[in-house]
Image: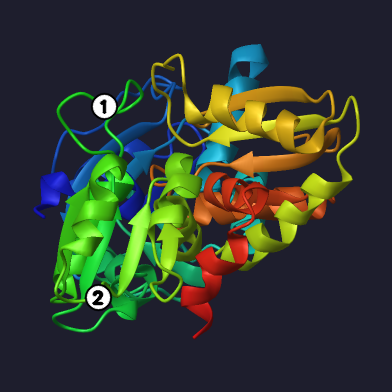
Amino acid sequence: MGLNDTPSADRIHIGFFGCRNAGKSSVVNAVTGQELAVVSERLGTTTDPVMKAMELLPLGPVMIIDTPGFDDEGELGEKRVKRTKQILNRADIAILVVDAQVGMREADEELAALFREKEIPYLILMNKVDVIEGREADAGPGEGHEMYVSARTGEGIEECKEVIGKMVSVEDTRRRIVGDLLKPSDVAVLVVPIDSAAPKGRLILPQQQTIRDVLEADASAVVVKESGLRETLAGMAKKPAVVITDSQVFAQVSRCVPPDIPLTSFSILMARMKGYLETAVEGVEAVERLQDGDRILISEGCTHHRQCEDIGSVKIPRWLKEYTGKELEIELSAGRGFPEDLYSYALIIHCGGCMLNEREVRYRMKCAADQGVPFTNYGITIAYMQGILKRSIELFRK
């Protein structure tokens, strides 16, 4: 997979934050070596987060995010500040750009406190060092994570990039989907429905990523539709190490797969990779406590055109009501539009999160935990309601 093919969720997200006219966008352009952001002397030039995929060694593929000024004013300014805070939910590294002529302002101190609260590795870049008499750019961060740089002259920028490149361990960001559970020459069978809800001419991202991960483990991936699974298994000379299915055909696939072959789903594998499998397994038990009138939030990390048999908006709500026998209020959220106030929900059922990085998925999980709301995901909910949850997570307990 090349740089341009690396999914956004698999990139290290580096957010640039700061007050208006601190030179934030100029620093972004200097670090990226591109005219990524519009630069102007006028306050508040950056009105929306600007994102750019690039490569920053030794981290590899990263997503650079330039955010609006955190000290923005007025009603529109409040919305920009809110969006800036949302960026923090998915930032793996935070860069605070400060006008060195002015020093740390109240808004800068607030941002630094947010970085610490959210446990985000951060660096403070004191910009415009070229206009401070007798001050030179630093070769490395001093006390309080600070470095002095100049976006205009380029002083300290290369040293800054080296520091950023060491702030997050590449190994810490590289979780496997299933490859760590496979041995060379193993066979993984992937069950991929091709129905009205499937994207035309391609596989969905979790399916693509799983195939790649299987191959990186020097194992083999056999991809079949659910209608051909039984015949495929019967014709295989070697027993599969695992069968991985799309969650919506879990029950049908479970009937076809012998008990001695491990079975799980793409959604459950994504929960494992994003680091919230255990929480999701505990959270799904709330299904048994649902009552008439309870509100359920079904949340997806991406936005897409919903089909007549969409898994999130149609199938899961229908299966929930059939399983519980209760009249439930179902609400939907998509993309970045995850609610801040979750107290009114009895349960949150999230998608696998393939379009979100691990930090944002875990942030959503933590928000739910802080407000006492059970949190689970699509595949685990479906497996639970169909009585096959224990089997579908047995693979991870060996």
> Residue 282 versus residue 42: which sits nearer the camera?
282
Secondary structure beneath dot 1 equals loop
Q: Point out which mark residue 239 bears.
A: 2
> Which residue occupies 91% across, 34% down?
291
Q: In which quarter of the image is the N terminus?
A: bottom left
Q: Distance between the residues labelled 2 and 1?
A: 30 Å
> In the visual, does 271 lie left or right of 369?
left
Q: Which amino acid lies under the numbered mark 2 shown in the image of this protein? A: Lys
Q: Splitting the image into 4 quarters, where does residue 350 fall?
A: top right
Q: CB of mark 2 within 8 Å of CB of mark 1?
A: no
Crowd class of label 2 (few under 14; some 14 to 19; many from 20; radius 10 Å): some
Q: Residue 179 or 226: which is nearer the viewer?
A: 226
Expressed as whole percent of the image width and height from the top left, the position of residue 5 reads 14, 46
Number of numbered markers: 2
Query: Of residues 219 and 60, which is closer to you in this image?
Result: 219
Residue at screen point 77% across, 50% down: 374
- Determine which residue is flagged by label 1: 199
Residue type marked 1: Pro
Residue at 40% in and 67% down: 258
* Residue nearest the viewer, comparing 26 with 220: 220
For this orientation, the residue located farthest to the left is 2
Q: Earlier in the sequence, mark 2 or mark 1?
A: 1
Q: Residues within 10 Å of mark 1 (few under 14, many from 20)?
A: few
Residue 370 in the image: x percent, y percent?
80, 54
Tell me the SS state at disc 2.
loop
**Quadrant of the rendered structure where residue 295 is?**
top right
Residue 221 in the figure: left or right of residue 207: left
Residue visible at 40% across and 57% down?
Answer: 125
Residue 226, position in %: x, y? 31, 43
